[in-house]
Image: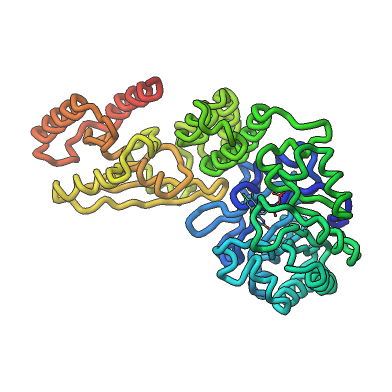
Amino acid sequence: MGISFSDKIILAPMVRVGTLPMRLLALDYGADIVYCEELVDIKMLQCKRVVNEVLQTVDYVSPTERIVFQTCEREKGCVVFQMGTADAKRALAVAKLVENDVAAIDVNMGCPKEYSTKGGMGAALLSSPEKIEEVLKTLVNGISKPVTCKIRILSTVEETVSLVKMIEKTGVSAIAVHGRKKEERPQHPVHCDFIKAIAEAVSIPVIANGGSQEIIREFVDIEAFKSLTAASSVMLARAAMWNPSIFRREGVLSIDDVIHDYIEHAVRYDNHYTNTKYCLCQMLREKLESSLGKKLHAAQSTKEICAVFGMTTFYESCTLSQEARRKSINIISQGTLEVDDDKNEEIVDATQLPVKFEKKDYLPQITPKMVLLEWCRKEKLPQPVYQTVQRSLDRFFHSVVTVNEKKYCSVLWDKSKKLAEQAAAIVCLRTLELPEGKIGEEESDLVHKRKRKMQYQNVGSGNLSEMPQTKKLHQEDDKTEGKDKES
Ligand code: FNR
């Protein structure tokens, strides 16, 4: 049976906020339906659908390997995919791409922001009823899942009701109404009377939206907003962004508890740390200037975010169990390199170290890749050549760099091609005992490295093939790694 929009409490679509961890948290706390953030049709059409067996998610991944939309079994029956579109053909193509992974498709017709309206999408659609009709009819006829749309109100009740009646005729299953005009800001009062007139004029479920802050401060207020608007359902944005436990019938939780619950989802689903940070900042609000807020601002990875909130143990156990899952489905595990058969040849004779590139340790303009390139130029060697592969199960990358006919790579796989290449460059630099370009790289360390390097050059007249055997260097570097971890 398909999803119903009657008598529901719903998480509104919110750019950057409505990603998977927030949607799952809203469901945990009692939301019936969750909308994803608005995703623009053109961007979605460039994505490929990938099943991540480690995280057990379905990811829509851009050509630059960014996850644009991530979903999982838990929300399959209640997640609505909201798209930004002004083109019926493209809208249908996107809907067909995602329809088997979601419960319904929504079209955003209310966003007044320039990035949306300038393409004729969002609130710009409200002035093109023929376009609205074409897009919605194409979707309703073209896919098997319910279609909804989210609008803002027009200048008068009559105009708005007339538009909504036309929308109803396209066959949509429900309509969400943000009770503000497109030129009104969130602090303007919400027009409950407009929503009420709409709810009384059509027979499809009307979802009332716009009541956060002014009307809805806790769960019981949701019911009050519903009666004021005579709507079938209620959709919450800001109130849920500030404290998603607003969906709890038993009452809101303290923001500390909510943050803890949010981080658990963010770590479990390997959410990008910048998105996690953004959502946590919305929850911290007034506390952003506190020392906790400042620490959050400074955090540069999920691990560091967890440390700020005293969740390092959780982070470690979760990442360990993800590693174990990787192992159990026969892919890489930390410290050993298991690769596809066709890649074996590439790395079998490579120098390998357990190295990861930590962005915060380097200045943006002095990365290990740049240092290595510069060194090759100085030594009149050919440019380093990177060969990078991606494995299918979790889409992690591995890179082998060839310098002076020798290969170097990390034993660890990375989330992005860039990171994997930087790691390979570090392995090469470290093996050759060259400076890596790290911030605060000890002068004495560099002098030591240079001395050692000169000794080798004396032995082999600068020929790198005369460098000490890889195994020895491995042992030394393993120690360095250990030290790095401790410090
Ligand atoms: C939004 N809103 C919004 N609307 C939409 O249709 N698609 C979107 O992607 C977004 N993105 C978004 C991001 C953020 C951070 C906010 C605060 C809002 C508008 C939102 O869904 C809702 O219509 C308004 O916020 C009014 O509802 P509340 O906040 O009063 O519950």
Check the image and tell me how it is coloured. Answer: rainbow
Left or right of residue 412: residue 132: right
Would you say residue 174 is visible in this rendering?
yes
Q: Position of residue 116 (x, y in %)?
A: 59, 64
Task: Give residue 29's position: percent from left, percent from top.
Answer: 77, 37
Is residue 358 or residue 41 the one in the foreground?
41
Which residue occupies the extreme bottom position in the image? Answer: 130
**Quadrant housing residue 56:** top right
Instruction: From the viewer's side, name the closer residue of 21 and 444.
Output: 21
Above-or-below relation of 242 to 176: above
Residue at (50% x, 59% y) in the render: 63
Q: Is residue 361 above or below residue 402?
A: above
At horizontal 66% and vertical 59% (from top left) the residue drawn is: 184
Quarter of the picture containing the C terminus is top left
In the image, 139 versus 396, the foreground residue is 139
Classify residue 364 by image quadrant.
top left
